[in-house]
C-alpha cells in the first residue's frame, strides 16, 4: 500500500505509513549520480541453472572461534569444498582462521560490519563492501569476487554498488534451520537440494548454530549418495547453463 493511501478526509497518517516514508527517503536509490558509468545490470542469484550435479555449501558470519574450525575439519575429512561469506571485522580479529579457510575454500564478501543494507544508501554500501574486501584481501592475499548482503537484505543502491564492484549478489535457495533438530534438517535439505542449489549455514553469528556442524557430515554423505558434488560459488556460477550468472563487466 502506498504511504498515506488510507488518509481520507479527516483521517491522519498511521504511524506505520509515516515510517515507510522515512525509510524510503533514508534508503538508497538504484540510479542517479552515484551509478558507476559501466554498470548495465545487476545479478541476484538464489540458485544457478546447471546441467551438472553440483551444489554450493556456504557458511556466513565467520570466522568465529565457535564453529569455524569444526566446520573446516568436517569439510577436510570429507574432501568437501565450500564458500565462506566472512565479516571484515571478524577477519581482522581472527586472521589466522581466515587464512586457514582461504587455503582450501572460497571466501566471499559479507561486508565490514554486517549492517542491514536495505536501509542504507550507496555511500554506506560502498564503504561496507570496500572495507570488507580490503580486509579479506590483505589477510588472505585473495580479493573476494562474490558478495552476500547481511540477512539477505538489500536495496537498489546495494545492488547498484555491488554491480559496480563486479560482484554478483549471492543469496540461497536452501538453508539450515536452527529451530529444527539434526535429522529434520538433514531429511528436509536432502529432499529439497537439487543441482545448482546454494545452501546457507552459519559458522559464526550470535545465534546458537550448533546444529550446522552436527548435521553437516550427515548431509554431505546424503547428498553424495544422491550423486551431487560440492563446488565453490564461483565454480557454480561458471558452470551455469547458458553462461555465467555473474554481472557483465564494463
Ligand atoms: Zn550474515
Image (cartoon, rainbow, N blue to C red):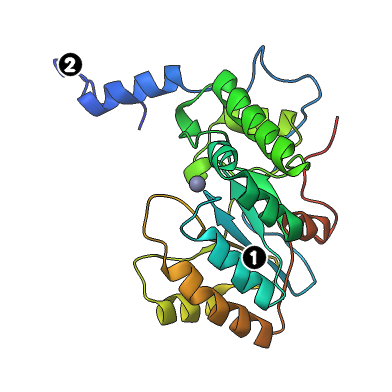
Contact between marks 2 and 1 (CB within 8 A): the answer is no
Task: Kindly indicate the quadrant of the structure image that contains residue 48.
Answer: bottom right
Horizontal and vertical percent position of residue 166: 76, 35
| Mark nearer the viewer, 2 or 1 | 1
Most extreme residue toward the bottom is 225
Residue 206 picture location, percent across and down:
38, 50
State the mark number for residue 197: 1
Q: Is mark 2 within 8 Å of ligand 1?
A: no
Of residues 226 and 30, the one drawn nearer to the viewer in this rendering: 226
Relative height, residue 75 to residue 156 (above, below)? below
Return the x and y of residue 229 as percentages of the image width and height: 73, 75
Q: Residue visible at 37% across and 60% down?
A: 208
- The earlier-in-sequence mark between 2 and 1 is 2
Residue 13's place in the image compared with 156, above or below, is above
Q: Looking at the image, which residue is at 49% across and 55% down?
A: 65
Q: Out of 26 and 17, give the one closest to the viewer.
A: 26
Counting other residues with Cα less than 10 Å from the Cα at mark 1, is it few (<14), some (14-19), or many (20 or more)?
Answer: many
Q: Secondary structure at mark 2?
A: loop
Task: Name the one closer to the observer, 197 or 215.
Answer: 215
Which residue is the extreme one toward the front?
Answer: 96
Quadrant into which the N terminus falls: top left
Figure quadrant of the C terminus:
top right
Give the residue displayed 78% in from the left and 43% down from the top: 142
Is 22 on the left or on the right of 37, as rendered?
left
Residue underneath mark 2: 9
Image coordinates of residue 121 in percent, x first then y, are 53, 21
Residue 185 lies left or right of residue 75; in this view the side is left
The answer to whether residue 136 of the structure is visible from this angle is: yes
The quadrant in which residue 191 appears is bottom right
Q: How many marks?
A: 2
Amino acid at each position: 500500500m502506498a504511504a498515506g493511501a488510507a488518509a481520507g478526509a479527516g483521517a491522519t497518517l498511521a504511524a506505520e505509513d509515516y515510517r515507510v516514508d522515512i525509510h524510503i527517503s533514508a534508503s538508497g536509490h538504484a540510479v542517479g549520480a552515484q551509478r558507476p558509468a559501466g554498470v548495465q545490470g545487476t545479478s541476484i542469484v538464489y540458485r544457478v541453472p546447471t546441467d551438472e550435479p553440483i551444489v554450493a555449501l556456504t557458511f556466513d558470519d565467520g570466522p568465529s572461534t565457535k564453529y569455524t574450525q569444526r566446520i573446516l575439519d568436517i569439510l577436510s575429512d570429507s574432501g568437501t569444498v565450500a564458500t565462506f561469506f566472512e565479516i571484515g571485522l571478524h577477519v581482522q580479529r581472527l586472521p589466522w582462521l581466515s587464512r586457514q579457510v582461504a587455503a582450501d575454500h572460497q571466501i566471499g564478501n559479507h561486508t565490514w560490519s554486517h549492517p542491514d543494507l536495505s536501509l542504507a544508501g550507496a555511500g554506506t554500501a560502498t564503504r561496507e563492501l570496500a572495507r570488507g574486501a580490503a580486509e579479506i584481501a590483505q589477510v588472505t592475499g585473495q580479493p573476494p569476487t562474490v558478495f552476500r548482503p547481511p540477512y539477505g537484505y538489500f536495496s537498489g543502491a546495494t545492488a547498484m554498488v555491488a554491480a559496480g564492484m563486479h560482484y554478483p549478489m549471492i543469496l540461497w535457495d536452501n538453508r539450515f534451520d536452527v529451530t529444527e533438530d539434526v535429522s529434520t534438517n538433514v531429511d528436509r535439505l536432502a529432499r529439497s537440494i537439487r543441482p545448482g542449489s546454494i545452501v546457507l549455514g552459519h559458522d559464526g553469528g550470535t545465534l546458537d548454530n550448533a546444529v550446522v556442524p552436527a548435521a553437516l557430515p550427515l548431509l554431505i554423505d546424503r547428498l553424495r549418495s544422491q550423486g551431487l558434488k560440492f563446488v565453490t560459488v564461483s565454480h557454480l556460477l561458471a558452470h551455469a547453463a547458458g553462461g555465467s550468472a555473474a554481472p557483465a563487466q564494463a
